[in-house]
Amino acid sequence: MIHRVARLFDKVQNDAEVAKWIRVFSRTDRNFAVIKISGASLFQYPNEICEDLAILSKLDLHVPVVYGWGNALTKKLELAGQKTLMHHTGVRVTRKSDLSFMEEVAHEHGMMIVEGLNERGIPAEVALDIFKAERKILDGIDFEHFTGDIKCVDTDKLKEYLRKGIIPVIPPIGRNEEGQIFNINADTAAKAIVLDLIPQKYILLTNTRGVLDKSGELISQISISADYLNLVEQGIINEGMKLKIDEAKEIIEGMAHLEEDIAVQIANPENILSELFTDGGKGTFVKK
C-alpha cells in the first residue's frame, strides 16, 4: 500500500491536489470513475495503462474499464481482403461477415488488459453481457447489419464486480433478446455506463493527448455551451473526436438535473493518475 501511495504522489507531482482528491474520493459512496481506452492507446501504452490501474486498485479505487479496437479490426479485415464500411455519422457499419473478426479482436484486446493486471496481482475479468442491444437505425443502409444501440446496462453486474474488488474489463458488445450480438461504438458504450453509475470522473484515453487545435496545440478546456459549435464549424472537432465530444456533451447534459457534477477529461494514457488526482489534468477538460 505504502509503495502504491508513493508511486501516486511521484507520478502526479502535485502533492496538494493529490491529497485533496484522495479526501474527496474517500468521503463519498459515489462511484469513483469510469475509464474508456481507445484501441490505439491500448496497443501503444499497455504497460502504462495497467500499471496505473493497478495503483488505483491497490488503493481500493476500482474502476470499470471500457475498451475499443477500431484500428485493429480494420487491419484484421484488410488482411482478410475485406474493406471497412463506415457510416456518415462516424460509426462502423458491422456486417455479418465482420462478426467473427470482431469477437476475435475483442477477446485479444480484453485479455491484454486482464493479463496485464493479473501479472500485477490485480483481479480483473472480461465482463461480458453488460449491454442489452438492438439494431441501430442507420439511414442509407438498406441491408442487414449488426451495429447496435444500447437498450440497457446491467449495472448490478458491474457493481458486483466492483464490490468484490475485481476490475470489469468491458467490450462494447451487446446482445438482443434472441442472443444476437451487436457491435457498439466504444464511446457510446462508455457513456451508457457513466450515465448509469454517475461517477465523479470520466476519463477517455486517446493518443492525441486531448483535443488539438489546427496548429496541433492542446486545447486544455472546452465549454460545451460556449465552445462546442464554434469548434465544430472550424473543423477542429471532427470524425472520431467529434463522437467523443458528442458523447461527453450528452453525459454533461444528461446529468444537468442532478446535484452531482462530473469531470469529463480526454487525455493521454500516460496521464491517467494526473487526470484523476488533479483539478484540471493534463489533457482536455470538457465542461458545461
Image (cartoon, rainbow, N blue to C red):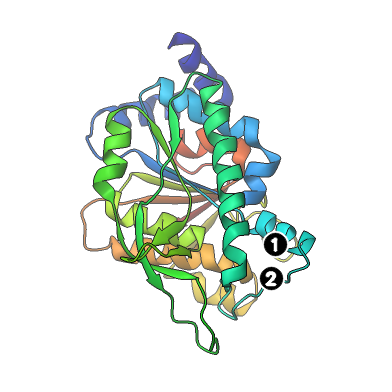
Q: Is residue 224 above or below residue 156?
A: below
| Mark 2 Cα-neighbour bin, 10 Å: few <14, some 14–19, many ≥20 | some
- Residue under the point 66% across and 37% down: 45
Q: For numbered disc 1, what is the local secondary structure?
A: helix
- The percent coordinates of residue 245 (x first, y second) are 50, 64
> Where does label 1 land, which residue?
74
Is 215 left or right of 120, judged from the image as shown? right
- The percent coordinates of residue 166 (x first, y second) are 37, 30
Q: Is residue 10 above or below residue 194?
A: above
Mark 2 in CB contact with mark 1 (< 8 angstroms): yes
Q: Residue furthest front?
A: 178
- Residue under the point 56% across and 37% down: 111
Q: Is residue 193 visible in the rendered structure shown here? A: yes
- The percent coordinates of residue 131 (x first, y second) are 36, 57
Q: Amino acid at mark 1?
A: Thr
The answer to which quarter of the image holds residue 165 is: top left
Q: Tell me how many marks there are.
A: 2
Quadrant the C terminus occupies: bottom left
- The percent coordinates of residue 253 (x first, y second) are 33, 66
Q: For numbered disc 2, what is the local secondary structure?
A: loop
Q: Amino acid at mark 2?
A: Thr
> Looking at this view, is 83 or 283 the one in front?
83
Residue 142 badge: none
> Where does label 2 land, which residue?
84
Quadrant the N terminus occupies: top left
Q: Earlier in the sequence, mark 2 or mark 1?
A: 1
